[in-house]
Image: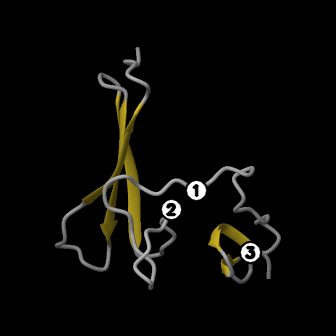
Amino acid sequence: MRAYGAAIGDKKREVPPGYQEEYVESGDPNGLEPVVPTIAPLLDEGGKPLPYIASNDITVFSILDTATGTVSSYRFDTREPESKVVKFDEFAFMGKQLGF
């Protein structure tokens, strides 16, 4: 099996069975350093923040506020339907407003 998606060190996500022909290896963002979420990143087993979310149980979505040029990202654990949505990252486009 070939690894795909996010990987840190030797921890790699394997391509699911039956999809090897549909996925290509990835994970290196062209030499760029990973960026850890600014507000509430998920943590690995050692308590270190992860620069990504790779889960079958956590849904992630982002909202672009065109008036402020801000992107806010949220996560929701589908195993706990009554839990709250958590804002885990936010950034702005260099102070510019977007004209949509």
Q: Quadrant of the C terminus?
A: top left
Q: Which residue is at 76% across, 66% downward? A: 23
Give the label on residue 34, or none: 1
Label 1, secondary structure: give it: loop
Amino acid beneath label 1: Pro
Q: What is the spatial separation of the Cα atoms under label 1 and label 2, in whole angstroms?
A: 6 Å
The residue identified by callout 2 is 51
Residue 81 location, quadrant:
bottom left
Q: Evaluate if marks 1 and 2 touch, with contact meaning CB atoms under 8 Å apart.
A: yes
Q: Where does residue 78 sit, x and y in percent of width and height?
A: 32, 73
Q: How many marks?
A: 3
Dot placed on the residue nearer the N-terminal end, 3 or 1: 3
Q: Where does residue 1 sit, x and y in percent of width and height?
A: 80, 82
| Label 2 crowd bin: few (<14), some (14–19), many (20+), radius 10 Å | some
Residue 57 location, quadrant:
bottom left
Q: Nearer the viewer, mark 2 or mark 3?
A: 2
The residue identified by callout 3 is 3
Q: Where does residue 48 sit, x and y in percent of width and height?
A: 44, 74
Dot placed on the residue nearer the N-terminal end, 2 or 3: 3
Image height check: is 86 above or below 73? below
Amino acid beneath label 3: Ala
Q: What is the spatial separation of the Cα atoms under label 2 and label 3, in whole angstroms?
A: 17 Å
Give the label on residue 81, or none: none
Residue 60 location, quadrant:
bottom left
